[in-house]
Amino acid sequence: MHFAQVALAWIGPAYLLAVSLPLAIIDIRQRRLPNRLVLPGLAITLLAHVSAVLFGAEWARMLTAWLTATLVFALAAFANYFGALGMGDVKLMALMTAALSWFGWQHPLIAFAVAFVLATVGVLVLFVARRAKLGSTVALGPYLLAGFAVAATGLAWS
């Protein structure tokens, strides 16, 4: 890929990195991930991918990224139906997938693996400290965003 294509493809991840701190703070305080911060990321990422394709990037990258994001959205929405995830988490996971999977299928996988390992450790710490019990809710957004930051940082250095 040429520099312009890569730069355009990085617009989506850059947006999500830019709004990660406000999203994490809001999720910790209010247990929600506001649409006004998450949904623009989907549009920005789509426009960046379309622009990269117009600059000569492979359209299959865009197709793969958005099909993968749609699949993740569907699976996460299924988990939401059973109360395992909030809809903010569902939309955030779709955005993370769209932004990262342009660069390869392994990047969203790394982000989710890191996020769920961190969340597991965080919940265990809360249990041991007796600050949480079975049935307690935990803001997943900050863990998802941390996983995203780790994957994006690894991607930037690769």
Image (tube, helix red, strand yellow):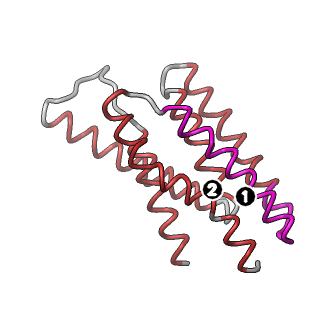
- Which residue is the site of mark 2? 12
Task: Tell me the residue at 32%/20% (across/down).
Answer: 135
Q: Position of residue 37 (x, y in %)?
A: 53, 39
The C terminus lies in which quarter of the figure? bottom right
Question: Magenta residues, as a range?
Answer: 34-62
Residue toward you, 150 or 50: 50
Q: Amino acid at mark 1?
A: Ala
Q: Position of residue 105 (x, y in %)?
A: 66, 59
Whether 38 is among the magenta residues is yes
Q: Position of residue 69 (x, y in %)?
A: 69, 45
Q: Are marks 1 and 2 in contact (CB under 8 Å)?
A: yes
- Which residue is the site of mark 1? 48
Whether 152 is drawn above or below 98: the answer is below
Q: Quadrant of residue 150?
A: bottom left
Q: CA distance from mark 1 to mark 2?
A: 7 Å
Q: Quadrant of residue 61?
A: bottom right
Residue toward you, 152 or 78: 152
Task: Tell me the residue at 62%/58% (across/down).
Answer: 100
Q: Disc 2 on helix, strand or loop?
A: helix
Q: Main secondary structure of the magenta part?
A: helix
- Horizontally, residue 6 falls left or right of residue 37, namely right
Q: Amino acid at mark 2?
A: Gly
- Horizontally, residue 13 falls left or right of residue 104, namely left
The N terminus lies in which quarter of the figure? bottom right
Q: Disc 1 on helix, strand or loop?
A: helix
Task: Tell me the residue at 58%/49% (across/down).
Answer: 96
Whether 44 is drawn above or below 52: the answer is above
Residue 38: mark in rendering: none
